[in-house]
């Protein structure tokens, strides 16, 4: 699989101090990837400009070519961030709107799944999920009748299990979700669903399903909106 | 009577060489003002007691030069560079802002299009917040380019829509539909402008030269989508909140009495970036791209989704489509 860097090379070219700062206390990036990984120099002039203008933006996004969508218009999936301050943010004037790319399997260093879920230490059938994973609201499994092992591989909880028995890494959540949500997945691959990083031009890097949706509680949460406009257009009296 | 008045006027070219030269009103005014400015400088240099600091004098000189400049559309590259240098200097001197004003032109082979997913929008108004910060919108008058309408489910009826909702969203039985400037392919607003201060760029963005606008608001009356905003007072943006990445035709400082509008974030989109509203949308309801690129997302939406536009019977041909999942 071709694995490419987006933004990293550009940021280190334009502002070496910035990326050097991000790397403090971190192993070399190449060590975080399995053997055979190819780090390709960035070719997006847009990303280079963005990195120069907005420190932090796109500095640490890694992209994979999407598995299973060959033959369609090309795109890549942003899989995770590598820096200690995992995340992706854009500056709008003085405020920062974060777009969080949740760190996935290779970044699960503090509590790797396998520290508990290896062999028979804690099996997926154990009913201790609310005790340990208290932050997970199992709304989606409850409504769809799924259990942990429907999506998570029992022998290695850091892997996802597909319906046909294959295993997929956490970063490729779209392969799992697309098994049921194929309409949304097709729209995502085409460009009608989801978000694209790095602008409308150049390489098309999109976010994966779980970057926006909590897989256990996928619907958007309600909230209080930003303030309403002061001036409002005249509405007709008779609705 | 008319004969007598004509007789009072000197014949053209009779009284000196100035009238024989092909000098238009603007150039003549510039020459006169230039002389006045030089004279004032000489005067103030001779009499330091007139109370004007060198900085104030520079502001005055720059402001005069700005006052007599031409329409941006017909400026040469040098003239554009000069006025941008003046505007950046004025921002520093008058408002203590360190801004960069672009004059980036349209990319060849690019026409921008926008699509809005009314199934996705939840009415959070994150786009509005990002737009205000990105485009240096007036904080005091609370100008907003984007309207998010809370619509009753089942029909697109703006009489049942409410853009002033302020409660937890999404509300039951409603969907949300956002409007802004649609950058029409056949814009009625540009044709009514009596001074040519607004026009359509080759990439489809309808822009305004704020220094040429006279504030007559004809364009606002002509726009069937209520997309333009008028500055009843000088826009106020706290210096620490000013977005320094600016474009002459976009988010640079406006003044009292001019019209402004959404430009698809011209300073961002012409550099290959997404408009601020697209980036800020937490639901992915906004799709932006090049209509001429068959691999773009906007083309995928137009080819695969049922889309509609607002007030299509007016033949304004908006480059802004609505679609559902």
Image (tube, rainbow, N blue to C red):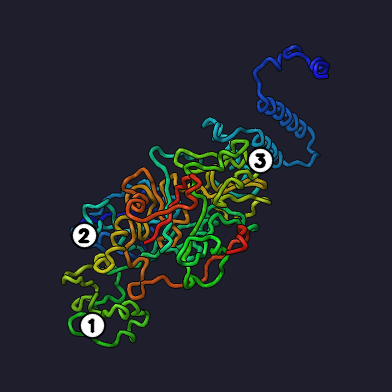
Determine the residue positioned at 59% across, 34% down.
B71
Q: Is residue B37 left or right of residue B142?
A: right
Give the quadrant of residue B31: top right
Res. A124 mark:
1
Can you say which quadrant of the picture contains the C terminus of chain A? bottom right
Structural crowding at the residue carrying mark 3, measured as other residues with C-alpha within 10 Å and reported as few (<14), some (14–19) or many (≥20): some
Percent coordinates x, y for residue B296 in the rendering = 34, 49
Q: Nearer the viewer, mark 1 or mark 3?
A: 3
Q: Which is more toward the observer, B252 or A5?
A: B252
Give the quadrant of residue A105: bottom left
The answer, for residue B265, to whether it is visible in the render is no
Tally of numbered discs? 3
Percent coordinates x, y for residue B144 in the rendering = 57, 56
What is the chain identity of the residue bearing mark 2? A
Q: Return the residue at label 2.
A: A68
Res. B108 mark:
none
Percent coordinates x, y for residue B278 in the rendering = 44, 56
Structural crowding at the residue carrying mark 2, measured as other residues with C-alpha within 10 Å and reported as few (<14), some (14–19) or many (≥20): few
Disc 2 on helix, strand or loop? loop
Q: Is residue A81 left or right of residue B70?
A: left
């Amino acid at each position: 699989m071709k694995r490419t860097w987006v933004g990293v090379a550009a940021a280190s070219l334009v502002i070496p101090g910035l990326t050097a700062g991000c790397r403090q206390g971190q192993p070399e990036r190449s060590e975080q990837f399995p053997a055979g990984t190819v780090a390709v120099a960035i070719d997006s002039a847009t990303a280079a400009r963005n990195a120069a203008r907005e420190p932090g933006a796109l500095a640490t996004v890694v992209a994979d070519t999407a598995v299973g969508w060959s033959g369609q218009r090309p795109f890549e999936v942003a899989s995770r961030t590598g820096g200690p301050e995992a995340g992706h943010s854009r500056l709008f004037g003085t405020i920062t709107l974060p777009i969080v790319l949740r760190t996935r399997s290779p970044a699960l260093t503090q509590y790797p799944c396998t520290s508990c879920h290896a062999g028979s230490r804690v099996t997926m059938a154990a009913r201790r999920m609310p005790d340990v994973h208290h932050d997970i609201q199992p709304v989606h499994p409850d409504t769809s009748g799924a259990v942990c092992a429907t999506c998570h591989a029992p022998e290695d909880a850091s892997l996802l299990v597909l319906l046909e028995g294959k295993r997929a890494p956490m970063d490729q959540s779209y392969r799992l979700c697309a098994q049921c949500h194929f309409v949304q997945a097709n729209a995502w691959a085409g460009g009608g669903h989801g978000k694209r990083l790095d602008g409308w031009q150049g390489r098309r890097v999109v976010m994966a399903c779980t970057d926006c949706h909590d897989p256990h509680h996928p619907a958007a949460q309600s909230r209080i909106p930003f303030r309403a406009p002061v001036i409002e257009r005249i509405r007709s009296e008779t609705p | 009577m008319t004969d007598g008045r004509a007789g009072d006027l000197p014949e053209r070219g009779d009284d000196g060489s100035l009238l024989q030269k092909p000098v238009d009103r603007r150039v003549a005014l510039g020459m006169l003002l230039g002389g006045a400015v030089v004279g004032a400088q000489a005067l103030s240099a001779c009499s330091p007691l007139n109370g004007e600091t060198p900085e104030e004098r520079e502001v005055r000189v720059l402001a005069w030069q700005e006052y007599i400049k031409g329409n941006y559309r017909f400026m040469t590259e040098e003239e554009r560079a000069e006025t941008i240098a003046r505007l950046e200097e004025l921002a520093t001197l008058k408002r203590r802002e360190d801004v960069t004003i672009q004059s980036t032109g349209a990319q060849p082979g690019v026409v921008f299009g926008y699509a809005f997913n009314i199934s996705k929008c939840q009415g959070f108004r994150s786009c509005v917040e990002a737009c205000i910060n990105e485009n240096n919108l007036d904080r005091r008058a609370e100008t907003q380019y984007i309207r998010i309408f809370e619509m009753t489910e089942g029909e697109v009826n703006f009489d049942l829509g409410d853009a002033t909702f302020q409660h937890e969203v999404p509300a039951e039985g409603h969907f949300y539909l956002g409007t802004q400037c649609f950058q029409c392919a056949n814009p009625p607003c540009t044709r009514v402008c009596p001074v040519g201060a607004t026009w359509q760029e080759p990439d489809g963005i309808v822009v305004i030269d704020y220094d040429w606008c006279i504030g007559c608001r004809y364009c606002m009356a002509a726009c069937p989508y209520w997309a333009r905003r008028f500055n009843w007072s000088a826009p106020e943006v706290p210096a620490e909140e000013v977005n320094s990445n600016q474009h002459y035709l976009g988010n640079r400082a406006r003044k009292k009495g001019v019209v402004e509008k959404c430009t698809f974030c011209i300073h961002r989109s012409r550099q290959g970036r997404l408009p601020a509203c697209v980036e800020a949308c937490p639901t992915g309801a906004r799709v932006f791209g090049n209509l001429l690129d068959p691999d773009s997302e906007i083309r995928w939406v137009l080819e695969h989704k049922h889309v509609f536009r607002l007030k299509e019977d007016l033949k304004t041909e908006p480059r802004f489509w609505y679609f559902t999942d």
